[in-house]
Amino acid sequence: MPDVLGIRHASELYSKLSDEFHSRDTIIISIPEGAEADLSFVQLIESTRRQAKAKGKTFKLSSPASGSVLKVLERAGFINSFDQEDEKFWLHKEVTL
């Protein structure tokens, strides 16, 4: 992924994700440390994540969300409404009983 993950690069990001999605069954996304993200990036990742699940593909982040991605998740209210699957995907939190 590039260092700028926002609306101005959404088309490029979509193309990269789409290419990966169509050529692989397992897609692991690496978000550069210090990358600048906005809500459009989170929406694109969520959309791809749901599409992967519907198609039986594996879609993961290589490391937990941090920096501006984590801030976007917090500001947009995503974290407050996360279920266990969301926590595992975005924060790499495992379910404990």
Image: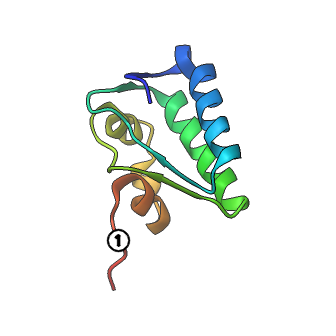
In x, y percent, where is residue 28? 47, 49
Total label count?
A: 1
Q: Looking at the image, is 9 positioned above or below residue 85?
A: above
Residue displayed at 47% across by 54% down: 60
Q: Secondary structure at mark 1?
A: loop
In x, y percent, where is residue 33? 27, 33
Q: Looking at the image, is 40 positioned above or below residue 86?
A: above
Three-letter residue code for mark 1: Glu
In front of the other: 27 or 35: 27
Q: Residue furthest top?
A: 8
The residue to which callout 1 is attached is 94
Residue displayed at 32% across by 50% down: 64
Colour mode of the rendering: rainbow
In x, y percent, where is residue 25? 63, 57
Q: Is residue 18 left or right of residue 13?
A: right
Location of the N terminus by quadrant is: top left
Q: Looking at the image, is 5 positioned above or below residue 55?
A: above
Location of the C terminus by quadrant is: bottom left
Q: Is residue 69 left or right of residue 45?
A: left
Residue displayed at 27% across by 35% down: 67
In x, y percent, where is residue 75? 38, 36
Circle 1 residues within 10 Å: few <14, some 14–19, many ≥20: few
